[in-house]
């Protein structure tokens, strides 16, 4: 119950969908509706807000932050796809991958599609976004979400990413991959609770099986011949699904290395993977999250020369 309370105390984050509107217009619209805009946040405590007050996030400029009780589900801006209701931590993967307009991108485990819609906004709907998910129902939800968000550069497929052929000619220009595979969800504040020791044993087996799936997905992603960068994320707090998966992957793929992420971000991956980011209720006022960015090493060397 306490964890649930913590979930209710997280700020409400609103990502402005730049395919449909601008941050300025959204701020103006909300001010006209009686919200008070306090400018850009500069420290963590600025995210603790009174009802009807809001700020621009200090790390992600397209993110607006509201008090925990604010609910936009019935709001015009949400229904019209101008705003996306998405936790701050889950905005990191697309933001950090930052695929330029016109490029080819894969979202490997994409449904329900908030990160795909974010990628499309960064790509300005130009280029190609291949998006896969095993679950047909979640993919149907994703179609609706992308339609509402005005996304047009996507190609959705109800397919196992592990069975997508990296060497198929249609993927020869794929330079960016976002991989946000199924995980334990242990970072989701509302899902956490007390666990008995029998459950803990079951959890260990489940974690091991998730970690092996996540590593297979990562290794598969790195096979795409034109790949430059891959972002890996989970909403798990367990190192087995995070740092340990990335460490094993780097050992198996010596042509890739980690990109150091956002020096100003307050929570890092566990030692020695401090180039990666973590997020948590205490340090970032978000759900628990992990992000790593891998880049092809030879590309990096070529760029420097
Ligand atoms: N990235 C999504 C978003 O931001 O909305 C959330 C993805 S969720 C954490 C993981 C997804 O992976 C689930 O929708 C699940 O159905 C899908 N999935 C699991 N195994 C898969 C596989 N082998 N190939 C493709 N998708 C898979």
Image (cartoon, rainbow, N blue to C red):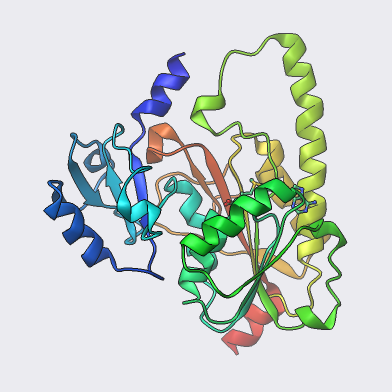
Q: Quadrant of residue 105?
A: bottom right
Q: Is residue 33 above or below residue 120?
A: above
Which is nearer the eye, 253 or 95? 95
Q: Quadrant of the C terminus?
A: bottom right
Q: In this view, does 207 lie above or below 38?
A: above
Identity of the residue drawn at 51% across and 76% down:
125
From the viewer's perspective, is 226 left or right of 262? right
Which is nearer the eye, 259 or 150? 150
Residue 9 pos. (x, y %): 34, 28
Q: Can residue 129 be seen in this view?
A: yes
Q: Is residue 203 above or below residue 162?
A: above
Q: Quadrant of residue 283?
A: top left
Identity of the residue drawn at 74% across and 50% down:
136
Residue 295 pos. (x, y %): 65, 69
Which is nearer the eye, 166 or 140? 140
Residue 148 pos. (x, y %): 47, 60
From the viewer's perspective, is 100 left or right of 36? right
From the viewer's perspective, is 20 left or right of 125? left
Q: In which quarter of the image is residue 194?
A: top right
Which residue is outermost to the bottom?
305
Residue 250 pos. (x, y %): 75, 58
Identity of the residue drawn at 40% across and 24% down:
6
Q: Can residue 111 be seen in this view?
A: no
Question: How many numbered discs sit on the rendered protein?
Answer: 0
């Amino acid at each position: 119950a306490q964890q649930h309370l913590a979930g209710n105390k997280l700020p409400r984050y609103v990502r402005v969908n730049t395919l449909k509107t601008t941050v300025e217009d959204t701020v103006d619209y909300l001010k006209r509706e009686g919200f008070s805009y306090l400018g850009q946040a500069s420290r963590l405590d600025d995210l603790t807000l009174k009802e009807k007050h809001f700020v621009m996030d200090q790390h992600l400029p397209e993110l607006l932050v509201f008090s925990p009780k604010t609910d936009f589900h019935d709001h015009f801006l949400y229904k019209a796809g101008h705003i996306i209701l998405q936790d701050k931590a889950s905005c990191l993967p697309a933001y950090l991958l930052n695929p330029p307009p016109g490029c080819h991108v894969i979202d490997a485990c994409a449904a329900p599609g908030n990160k795909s819609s974010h990628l499309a906004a960064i790509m300005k709907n130009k280029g190609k976004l291949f998006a896969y998910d095993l679950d047909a129902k979640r993919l149907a939800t994703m179609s609706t979400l992308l339609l509402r968000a005005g996304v047009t550069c996507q190609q959705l497929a109800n397919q196992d990413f592990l069975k997508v052929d990296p060497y198929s000619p249609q993927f020869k220009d794929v330079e960016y991959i976002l991989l946000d595979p199924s995980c334990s969800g242990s970072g989701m504040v509302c899902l956490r609770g007390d666990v008995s020791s029998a459950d803990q044993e079951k959890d260990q087996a489940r974690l091991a099986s998730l970690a092996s799936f996540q590593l297979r997905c990562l290794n598969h992603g790195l096979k795409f011949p034109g790949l430059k960068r891959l972002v890996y994320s989970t909403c798990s707090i367990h190192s087995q699904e995070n740092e340990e998966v990335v460490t094993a992957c780097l050992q198996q793929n010596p042509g890739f290395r980690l990109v150091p992420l956002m020096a100003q971000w307050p929570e890092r991956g566990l030692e020695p993977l401090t180039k990666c980011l973590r997020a948590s209720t205490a340090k970032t006022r978000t759900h628990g999250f992990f992000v790593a960015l891998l880049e092809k090493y030879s590309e990096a060397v070529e760029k420097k020369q």
